[in-house]
Image (cartoon, grey):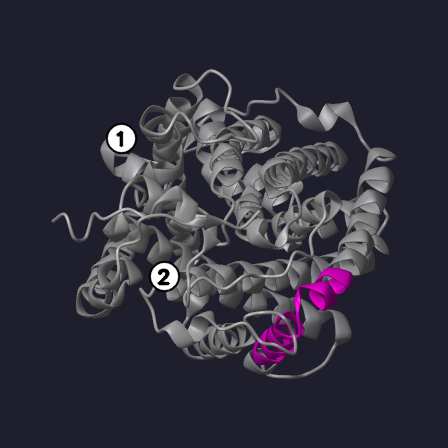
Amino acid sequence: MTTILRRLPPAEATGLRTGARHRLAEVYRPADLVILGLGVMIGAGIFSIAGRQAATTAGPGVIISFMIAGIACMLACLCYAELSSTIPASGSAYTFTYVIFGEVWAWVIGWALLLEMLLAAAVVAHVWSMFATRALAVPVHENVGTALILLLLTGVVALGARIGLRALWIMVIAKLAAILAVIVVGFMHFDPANLGDFVADPQPSTSPPDTVIDVLLGQSHNFGYLGVFAAAPAIAFAYLGFDIVATTAEETSNAPRAVPKGMIRSLGLATVIYIAVAVVMVGMAPYTAISPDAPLASAFTQVGQGWMVHVIDVGAILGLTTVILVLLVGQTRVLFSMARDGLLPSGLARISRRFHSPARTTVVLGVITTLVAVLVPVLTLEELVVMGTLFAFLFVAAGVVVLRRSRPDLPRGFSVPLTPAVPALSMLATLWLMLNLKVLTWGWFALWMAFGLLVYLLYGRRHSLLAAAPPKGGRHRR
């Protein structure tokens, strides 16, 4: 038991270990981290999720749902901010857990993060292909577009962070311009009467209960206050991604201060933008007249602004492209960190001398993601992305409290206020979001984690660098 619970010393997590811990080049500035966060949090969902949830679950009260989801994610973001300022390493929650809880738990979190980011990239690539073929009116099989965008962006990431960063800035600015157009034109047609009673009358759902909370209650509900709360977990999916900013800590100058600011600012901006679009959505047309399939497009069509559909399509394609790009960066850094610690083949932790990036790891993950996207019905497994993320949220929130008590001496560039109350609230909010996921999702996640533990026992436990030569100290890299 002590073997699998061995912990990585903080100095080793943020320092160079001879022959094992390779250094990533610093390329990110504070403003870059905000762009990175907006790049992954604002995708095509901004044009659809508000209308879909308003039409099917929450009514005009979807605005409150966005606020609830934003608060829940901000609680988790604050916890990530403290740990990333204390342990600024590329592994994010994986490395935090390695230092605080031990090796086997670190493996569990790393395995969950790989599932989250790999599956998310595959899902988003599928949606990108659907939008692109529709917008360009090209009769191409969906899998062709999916593979094309994944392989193209894999190449961009493999060429180095600087190239990917330049492309990200251009695309994020362009999609923010499209979103601004949506907000401005939408407010010109805002009608307060469309908000009605704001919280619509509750209606029992005709579909059988499939989430954990529905099973516990014995019935699922739409609209009313239960509908407002039920919409929040689906909306929280849109905010997920701020945690990926933490994976860039090794590549960020003055990371203990810059990374927390980047995460908090990007999540705050994303929340404001999502709420603004939600207000426009439910203010342009009655929620009963919104099409769940293309909500924002149908709303603009109803007010005589059909030309905005083209703006939405362009914004959606750009948004999805940036999401895929950042997800590929994030999953590469997590796998790189696990390989660097010996839990996965060490060859995946090599830095390309030519591109100054983990190019080999990027290509391997890009090919795997492409194969999964093409061969697996990933759109039916979308909730697993949320499950993997929320599972990591739990450990990060708990880690703040544990590390405060076990290592109060460690320097912190950011401290969560009102600890342990805020981390406790984060854990409760995360558990509530998890209970709103489908029972089937819990089952698939359990199978994935069981398979991961088997891989760890057969390979990771024996090849861990801590098992080979337990470190007695480390040289701080900054």
In this rendering, the count of numbered labels is 2
Q: Residue at x 25, y 65 (%)?
A: 460
Q: Is residue 293 left or right of residue 368?
A: right
Q: Residue 432: tell me if it is visible.
A: no
Residue, disc 1: 217
- Mark 2 vs mark 1, foreground winner is 2
Residue 150's spot in the image, x, y percent?
Answer: 59, 74
Q: Are marks 2 and 1 in contact (CB under 8 Å)?
A: no
Residue, disc 2: 341
Question: Which residue type carries mark 1?
Answer: Leu
Picture quadrant of residue 258: top right
Q: Residue at x 49, y 73 (%)?
A: 350
Position above or below: 390 against 316: above
Residue 270's spot in the image, x, y percent?
Answer: 67, 39
- In the rendered image, residue 158 lying in the magenta stretch gets the answer yes
Q: Which residues are magenta?
A: 145-167
Residue 259's spot in the image, x, y percent?
Answer: 61, 41
Question: Which residue type carries mark 2?
Answer: Asp
Main SS type for the magenta part?
A: helix
Depth check: give the residue in front, 415 or 430: 415
At numbered mark 2, what does the secondary structure look like: helix, strand or loop?
loop
Task: Choose the circle earlier in sequence order: 2 or 1.
Answer: 1
Q: Outermost residue toward the left?
A: 1
At numbered mark 1, what does the secondary structure look like: helix, strand or loop?
helix
Marks 2 and 1 sit apart, C-alpha to C-alpha, by: 44 Å
Q: Is residue 37 left or right of residue 204?
A: right
Q: Residue at x 53, y 52 (%)?
A: 247
Depth check: give the residue in front, 452 or 409: 409
